[in-house]
Amino acid sequence: MCKKFPLFSLTFITVLFFSWQAMAKNSITLDLPEEVIAQAITAMLPFNIDANSKNVQGNITVINITELEITNQHLACKLHLSGSNLVFVTEIVGHEIKLKVGAVEIDFVANAALRFDSTKQTLYIKPMVKDVATSGDGKNGEIGQALIALLNGREFPITMQKIDPLIAKAGAKTVTISTKIADIKAKKDFLQFQLIPVITSKPQ
């Protein structure tokens, strides 16, 4: 029985190795449910966003994201934003005027389109804003609408980190399975990742 075990192991490893080689020609689909995405977003909060422009300066922070809903090609959610040390910049008769607004908080519903750039490994989120409610020092001015104008229809990049490779030792070789994200799509109730595996091997 001991004499047969090495032969069985060699056969099993050979089949497994060629299965990995065949898999390398195809993409791997990974579906992340809506609940998992919502938990991941919650873990990231709060976070600052770069939304400064020639009209608005200051610090803008995403405080909360709720009511996440993933549909075909889109994400819908409710956002709570906070702006601090805000300055509203305008120009009158060729002169730049800076109006210190202070702080403002905004609640709004957004429907965002997704676009993935595989070359840059970057996911772009493009929100379209609706149902806006503002409060704070800037509620009676134009600062709330100016902040919304910064977000509305603008693409915000999210750089995807490399996925750690899967490493296995097979016989006298070490086999490494690395993956690259080929595409990210929004489907009903989940995000779908298309991964391209790259198989490499080297002697131990």
Image (cartoon, rainbow, N blue to C red):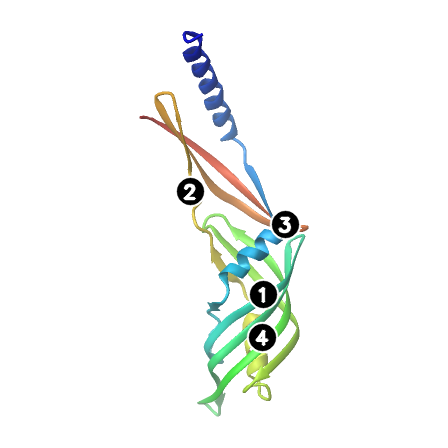
**Residue 36 at x, y percent in the picture:** 58, 52
Q: Quadrant of the C terminus?
A: top left
Q: Say which of 99 and 65 sits in front.
A: 65
Q: Are marks 2 and 4 in contact (CB under 8 Å)?
A: no
Q: Which residue is mark 3?
A: 190
Q: Looking at the image, which is closer to me, 186 or 43?
A: 43
Q: Residue furthest front?
A: 1
Label 4: how many Cα within 10 Å (few below 14, some 14–19, many 20+): some
Whichever of callouts 2 and 4 sits on the residue coming sooner in the sequence is 4
Cα separation between marks 1 and 4: 16 Å
Question: Of label 3 and label 2, which has the lower sequence position?
Answer: 2
User: Tag 3: residue type?
Assistant: Phe
- Amino acid type of the residue that numbered disc 1 sits on in the rendered structure: Ile
Numbered badge on residue 161: none
Q: Quadrant of the N terminus?
A: top left
What residue is shown at x 55% (from left), y 66% (from top)?
A: 154
Between 64 and 163, the one lying in front of the other is 64
Question: Residue tagged by mark 4?
Answer: 148
- The earlier-in-sequence mark between 4 and 3 is 4
Gap in angstroms between the C-alphas marked 4 and 3? 27 Å
Residue at image location 44% in from the left, 16% down from the top: 9
Q: Secondary structure at mark 4?
A: helix
Q: Residue 27 at x, y = what percent?
A: 54, 36
**Residue 65, label in figure:** 1
**What is the distance, in whole Å, between disc 1 and disc 2 at their CAs?**
28 Å
Mark 2 — residue? 164
Label 4 amino acid? Ile
Numbered disc 1: secondary structure: strand
Q: Earlier in the sequence, mark 1 or mark 4?
A: 1
